[in-house]
Amino acid sequence: MYFVDRVDAGRRLAERVRHLAGREVIVLGLPRGGVPVAAEVAKVLHTPLDVIVVRKLGVPFQPELGMGAIGEGGVRIVNDAVMRATRTTEQDLAEVEARERIELDRRARRYRGDRPRTELAGRTAIVVDDGIATGSTALAACLIARNQGAARVVLAVPVAPPDWTRRLADAADERVALSTPGEFYGIGQFYEDFAQTTDAEVISCLDEAAVRMAGDRPPDPASRLPARSVPARADDPEVVVDAGPVRLGGQLTVPEGTAGIVVFAHGSGSSRHSPRNRFVAGALNRAGLATLLFDLLTEEEAFDRANVFDTALLARRLTDATRWLHGRDDVGGLAVGYFGASTGAAAALWAAAEPGSTVRAVVSRGGRPDLAGPRLPAVTAPTLLIVGGDDHVVLDLNQQAQARLHCENQLAVIPGATHLFEEPGTLEEAADLAAQWFTAHLAPAPDRAP
């Protein structure tokens, strides 16, 4: 059995454990890769989602080889056979554990933010990862759940080696794996897309799950991001965007005296609640610009992963949303700009290249303009490409795309930033660059003297 990505794996796994749905159930994802899988399980089961933080203890001279794992609550699992085979001493183990314990505590604080750890006492804990390899981290996670008072522990994964139940016989009350192939060399071989999950993606999954369970809007992302604080946006009006044949949820913010409005196109797998896009939107609002963040797909459409990467479809949604804005009394006369993140940048440029497009400026953050392909030479709106200096593959793609743009354009490289601009100050710098670009290009042109 093969999976498109972790979202696909999570949805399939959810069907297998649907019988566990109940009021006393909590889904626990193993960061990082297990959290997107767990998020889909929690969504289908209508249960809370939390992380269960575990760190592998790697052999000092071969860190990819696990000699054990640690978790919250002081839990430690050690593989004595690996230690003997690699001649790892107790002192070596202690040094690795001390280093990993610091990282474990940091991640737990970063992932949860101000939210407390979910209480497990008396509940059924479904521990989810994106697959089982050696099983040491899964074993530690299950022991942590027991230690925190879970009445029943279920370990659920999309894929595992054939002998995984023997390895983890005492780890959980129930063990579920969708696939246990005989030829097992690594978890990634069973995924078409097994890209590394980032901290930001983990946080986004947890935030969206909290929103779903609370029936409220997501927490302010500024408390999670390494940048200056952003005022709470509780007064942002929720809107329904008429986008052709569908109606999509959105958030429209219109500062007093604004000169223009920026429409956001989120990346694949994200939504209008994207913490990073909301952070940038806050910076634009402070600069006097209106913003519209909206879902590019309905929930049903998003279930089909092909739609997530259908640039033409997403571009049509941007065009439809722009037409909807022009028909409103409050913002209909404003100049429009597009802000695209990751794959959303391709949709923004595709839409900007449409004949008769009214977009006046485009900004791409960590974007994939290459996915707009032959449309790039037709873009006439001034375009700013913002890329992290350490996002080497995407930087190369942006440099190639820039060479195909015939409009006013600029490539801004932020030193030290990776794809999601997680590094301190990098997202803030990207937001400032976007605000300057949009302010310069959306403001009304001064009247010329006769």
Image: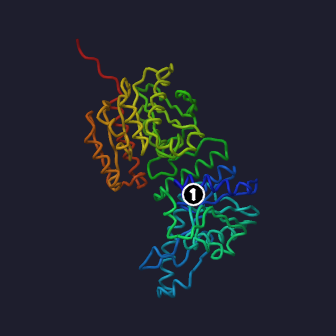
**What residue is shown at x 55% (from left), y 44% (from top)?**
304
- The kind of residue on which mark 1 rests is Val
Q: Look at 38% across and 25% down and name the residue there.
A: 358
For mark 1, give the secondary structure. helix
Instruction: Give how far across and how far down residue 107 sits, in percent.
Output: 52, 62
Residue lying at 47% horizontally and 33% vertically, measured from the top left: 291
Q: Is residue 363 left or right of residue 249?
A: left
Name the image quarter holding the C terminus: top left
Q: How many labels does the image show?
A: 1
x and y, in percent, of residue 384 in the image = 32, 39
Please state which of residues 69 and 149 is positioned toward the viewer in this rendering: 69
Residue beneath the point at 34% across and 23% down? 444
Residue 239 shows in this picture? no
- Quarter the N terminus occupies: bottom right
Question: Which residue in the rendered view is the most extreme toward the top?
Answer: 450
Q: In this view, does 250 lie above or below 41?
A: above
**Other residues around mark 1 within 10 Å, as few (<14) / some (14–19) / many (≥20):** many
Specify how the rendered protein is coloured: rainbow
Q: In this view, does 249 lie above or below 59?
A: above
- Mark 1 = which residue? 35
- Which residue is at the front of the view, 32 or 169? 169
